[in-house]
Image: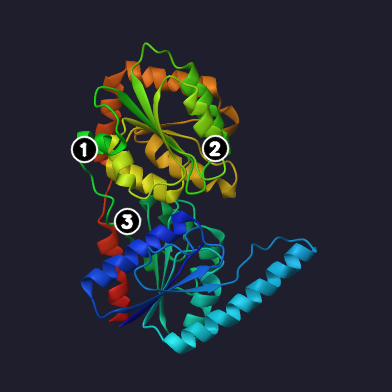
Amino acid sequence: MRILVATGSSGGHVFPAISLLTELKMKYADLEALLILPRDCILSGKDIFPCEVRYIPVSPIKFKLDLKNIVAVFNLLKGACKSLFILMEFRPDVVVGFGSLVSIPVIIFAWLMRISTLIHEQNVVIGRSNRFLCAFADRIAVSFPQSRGYFRGRKDKIIYTGNPIRPELTKIDRSKALDFFGLGSDSFTILAMGGSKGSHRINIEFLKAVAGISRGYKFQVIHLCGQGDYDLLNQGYGELDVRARLFSFLGPMHYAYSASDLVLCRCGALTISEIMFFALPAILVPYPHAYAHQSANAMVLAEKGSAVIIKDEELSAAVIKNKAEYFMAHQDELNNMRLSYRDFLITDANRTLAEAVLALAA
C-alpha cells in the first residue's frame, strides 16, 4: 500500500500530516509513504518525519503584476510539474491533502489519474485551497463539526475525524511536568505562546503584563516566543523577579500543557485541538488576518465557556494583567472552564483519519 501526503509550510499543517503518517506506519510497518512539503517549511531539515520527504517550490500568489508575483506563478508551475513527476514515479493508492497551495496540483493530478483522494480541513472555516479542491476529493475530513456548513453540496463526502495531534502529546502528571521545567507545584502557571513562529505582539504585551502583575499572586511563566524575539525576552525576564522558562521552540509540548493552569495564545487549528485534548482554560487572541479563520476557531471554545477571547486590536499588557489576576483570584471559574470540555465531541483523530485513508485504499 502506498500513501502520498501533501501539506503546507506551517506547524498547523505539517504536524497533523506527520501524526497521520505516524499512525499509518504504526499500523502497517510495510506501508510505503511519501510526504510532499514546500521548500520554506518551518520544519525543513529536522529529523522528525516518519517517511521520505520531497520538497517543491511554492510561493503565495497575489492579484497584482510585479516581479515577485511573476516569480510566484513560475514557482507554482514548476511545483505542479514536479508534483506530476512524483505521482507518476510513486504511483500511490491514496493521496491526502492538508490544504495550502502544495496540495492543489497534487490532488488535481491524482484525480485525473483516477487515484483516490482525501482532503483534510484543520480550521472551522474552510481554507481557499480546500474550498477549490473539494470538487476533486473523494472524501473531505473535518476537524470540527461546525465545518459541515461550509461545504454546501458536498456533505455526502464529509467525515468528522477531528484534527490529528502528535501521538507523543500525552497527558502527564502535573508535578512531573513542572519538574521538567524546574518549576514549583505551589504556584499558578501561565503558558504564553503565539504559534509555531511566535507572535511579536503577544510576546511584548505579555512580558509587560508579567512585570505588572501584583506580587501578591504566586505565579510562574512558561513562554514560547519564537526565534525572532528570544534575545529581547530573555533580557526582559532576566530583569524581573519572577520564575520564567523561555523557549524559542519546544518539542515536548505535552509537558507545557500538563504543567499549566492557564494558556494565552493564538487560535490556530492545531493549537485549539491540543488545548481541547488537554482541557486547558484559555485566553485566546485570534490572529486578525487569514480570512478570520482563527476567530471561528476561538468561538468553538468560547461558546462552551472553555475560553475567553481578546480581540487583537484590544490586546494590551493591562488587559492581560487584569485577566490573569482575575483567574488567579477565581480558581472556581477555572475549574468550571476545565469541566466544560466534557461537552465537546472528542475523537481519536489519528485513528479515525487513518481508517478513512485505508478505506479509500481498499
Q: Is residue 113 visible?
A: no
Q: For the residues marked 2 and 1, what is the alpha-carbon distance in whole angstroms? A: 28 Å
| Foreground tag (2 vs 1) | 2
Q: Is residue 177 above or below residue 11?
A: above
Please provide percent x and percent y for residue 322.
46, 18
State the residue at coordinates (48%, 68%). 134
2 or 1: tag closer to the N-terminus: 1
The reply to whether the C-beta atoms of the residues labelled 2 and 1 are less than 8 Å apart is: no
Classify mark 2: helix, strand or loop.
Answer: helix
Question: Which quadrant, please, contains the N terminus?
Answer: bottom left
Residue 346 shows up from this direction: yes
- The x, y position of residue 35, in whole percent, is 43, 72
98, 21: nearer the viewer: 21
Mark 1, residue position: 176
Which dot, 1 or 3, sits closer to the camera?
1
Colouring of the image: rainbow
Compared with 113, 283 (above or below) is above
Tell me which amino acid carries mark 1: Lys
- Label whose residue precedes the other's in the sequence (1 or 3): 3
Residue 272's place in the image compared with 347, above or below, is above
Task: State the residue position of label 2.
Answer: 231
Quadrant position of the C terminus in the picture: bottom left
User: Can you identify the residue that label 3 sits on?
Assistant: 166
